[in-house]
Amino acid sequence: MGFGQRAAGGGRELRLIVALLLASALMVGQTPSAARRPQSAAIPHRIISLIPSVTEMLFAIGAGDAVIGVSTFDHYPPSVETRTKVGGLLDPDFERILSLRPDLVIVYGTQSGLIERLGRAQIPMFNYEHAGLADVTQTLRQVGIRVGLADAANRLALDIEKRLRDIRTRIGDRPKPRTMIVFERETGTLRGMFASGGVGFLHDMLDTAGGADVFADVRRQSLQVTSEVALARAPEVILEIRSGPEWTPARIARERTVWGALGSVPAVRTGRIYLLTDEAMSIPGPRVPDAVQQMARVLHPDVFK
Amino acid sequence: MDVPHPLRRASPVIAFCFLAMVTAVLGAPFVGTTSISFVKVFSNAIASPDNLDRQIFLIARLPRAVAAALVGGCLSAAGVVFQGLLRNPLATPYTLGVSAGAALGAMVAITFGAATPVVGVASASLAGAALAVGVVYALASARRSGFSTTVLLLAGVTLNAFFSALILFVQYLSNFAQVYRAMRWLMGDLDVGSYSPIVAALPFIAVAFVAFAWLARPLNLLSLGAEAAESRGVDVERAQRLAFFSASLATGAAVSIGGPIGFIGIIVPHLVRLLVGADHRAVLPASTFLGAAFLVICDIIARTAIAPMELPVGVITALIGGPFFLWLLVRRR
C-alpha cells in the first residue's frame, strides 16, 4: 500500500532508485505477518491525517493524542472537531500542514502534488488508498506499526476480523438476496444513478453481510446504472448508501417512493428498499463491522434482530 | 403548383429524414442488451408489474428514444437558426452561452439541491439558460444602434467563458459524488427514466418550432445581408430577436432533458445542406428529422457499446462530430 517516504522530487535518477528501494524495503517491513518495528522511521508524535478512515484507526488504537491535524471531512470520533482542519482531498492546505510541524502525514495516493511537496520538505508520509474490505485491517496493522502501536493495532484488527467472521457465521448458508448498492442519484428521480461494482469495500461489505451483488461481474468500483439495467438486473434488495444531515426520516420515506417507477423490480414489489445513512457506511475504518452489521440486519432480518 | 424548384427537389430528402426518424424512434426500444420479445411487450396476459419486457420497453427504452429524438431535433434546428442568424456556418446552439447558463443552473442544483427543498436539475438548468439568454440579449440590445449580432456573438462567447468559471467555482464547493455527477451531466445523458422531463420541456419546444416555421423565409433573405433583407420587406431586427429567442428556447429545453450534448447542432445542418442546398424551408425540417434520427442512433450505441455500463452519449456525438467539424473547417479554409 504505500511508499513510506518519498525522497525529494529533484529528478536525479539514482536518488529515485534509492528512494524506491527504501520504499519497497519499508513495504516488506510492514507486512502484517512480519509485524516488526520499522528501523528507519521514528515514532511520530505530531500526526496529520487527511484520510477519515485512517484518523479513526489512529484514535481507535490510542494514537489520538498524537493527531494534531485532520481533514475537513473528518467528523469521527467527536474529539477530531478540536483538531486543526487542514483542508480536504483536493485542497490540502500545504502551508497550514507545514506550520503544524508534523512528523507524519497520512496522504491519499492520488494527492501527487502534496506528496511531492511534503517529500521536498522531508516530512514523512503514510500513503493510503481505498481498496477492499480485507485491506482495512491490513492498513490498520501497517498504521499501528508506523506509529509504534503495533500490538494495539493488531488486537483491534483481530477483533474486527472476528466480528466480520461472526457475521458470516451467523448468516451461514442462508440464501443471499440479490442486492444493488446505490450510492448516488439525482434527488426525486432515478436519473444519474451510480452503483457499487464488483470490486471495492462496498462490494466486500455486501458480500460479508450476506448479499449477492447484482453487479459482481462488473470489475470496477462503481458504474452508472440506467433504468434499463436496474430493471434487467432485477435486484431483490436495494441498498442506498447516503449520508449527511439532510437525510431526515421524511426525506428518506420520500426518496424510497421514487423507486415505484420500476414496478417489476422485486425489491420494489416487496418494498425491500433501504436507505442507510450512517456515515460509517462510507468510511472503511474501524467501524466497518458496525456498517456490515447494519447491512446484514436489513438483508437477513430474521438473523439480526 | 407554385412550389418553387428547390423545395421540389428537397421533398424526397425531407421525406427520407422523416422516415428515418420514425423508424429510429419505433425501432430503438427493441434494441438493447436485454433481449425483449415483441409479443410479450404487448401481451395483456401478464400483469404489468410482472411484465419485465413491457417495463423495459415502456419505462426504460421508449422515453429514452423519445427524449433522444426531441433533443436531437431541437439541437439540429436550433443550430440551423443560429447559423442563419449569425451568418456563420460554425455557429452551434451553444455559441451564445445558453448551454453554459444551463450547466451553471444544473451544477447549482446538483451541489446545493441536496440541502434545500428539492430543486430539479432539469428546471434549474432551464432557469440558468434563461438567465444567460437574458444577459446576452440585454447586452446585444444595449447599444443605441439597436440589436447587433456582432455584440450578440461577442457577449455570448464571453458569457460562456464567465459561466464556465462560475461552474468551476460551484464544483469546488461540491463533494466528490456531486462533482462526479456534475461531470456526468455535462457529458449528456438521455436516460430520463420517466416522461416528466419530456412533458415539462414540450411546451417550450412547441413554441420554438412555431417560430422556426415562421422564420424560414426571413432567414433565407437574411443570408443575403441585413440591408438586402430589409429592402425585401423583412423586419430584420424583429426576425433576429425572434430567431435568437426561439433557438435559445429550443436549446434550453433540449439541454434540460439530456444535458449539453455536443456537435449535433453542427453536424446535422451541414449534412442536410449538402443534400438539399441552403433554403431554410428545406433545411429546417430535414435537419429536425435527421437530427432526431441521428441522436436516437447515437443513444443506442451509448447504452449497448459497453453494457451494463453506459457510455455517455455526448462522448459518441463528440467522437463523430469533432473530426467532422475539423473537416468542415479545413474544407472551407
Image (cartoon, coloured by chain):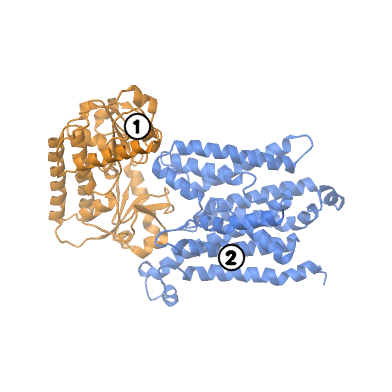
Q: Position of residue B227 (x, y in %)?
A: 84, 48
**Apparent side of residue B206 relative to residue A205 in the rendered image (left or right):** right
Of labels 2 and 1, the one closer to you: 1
Question: Is residue A111 at least partly visible in the picture?
Answer: no
Return the chain for callout 1: A
Dot 2 and dot 1 residues touching (CB under 8 Å): no
Q: Which residue is mark 2?
A: B293
Q: Is A67 rendered above or below residue B200?
A: above
Kind of element beneath mark 2: helix
Please report the residue visible at 21 percent of the width from the left and 52 percent of the height from the top. Answer: A296
Q: CA distance from mark 2 to mark 1?
A: 55 Å
Of the chain colours in the picture, the one used for chain B is blue
Question: Is residue A173 at least partly visible in the picture?
Answer: yes
- Quarter of the rendering occupied by the N terminus of chain A: top left
Q: Which residue is mark 1?
A: A119
Farthest front residue?
A14
**Viewer-nearest residue: A189 or A226:** A226
**Viewer-nearest residue: B100 or A108:** A108
Q: Position of residue A179 (x, y in %)?
A: 28, 58
**Apparent side of residue B188 relative to residue A242 in the rendered image (left or right):** right
Q: Is B241 rendered above or below residue B268?
A: above
Q: Position of residue B99 (x, y in %)?
A: 58, 46
Q: Is B295 rendered above or below residue A257?
A: below
Please report the residue visible at 59 percent of the width from the left and 44 percent of the height from the top. Answer: B129
Labels 2 and 1 positioned on one and the same chain: no
Return the chain for callout 2: B
**Apparent side of residue A170 relative to residue A258 in the rendered image (left or right):** left
Q: Which chain is orange?
A: A
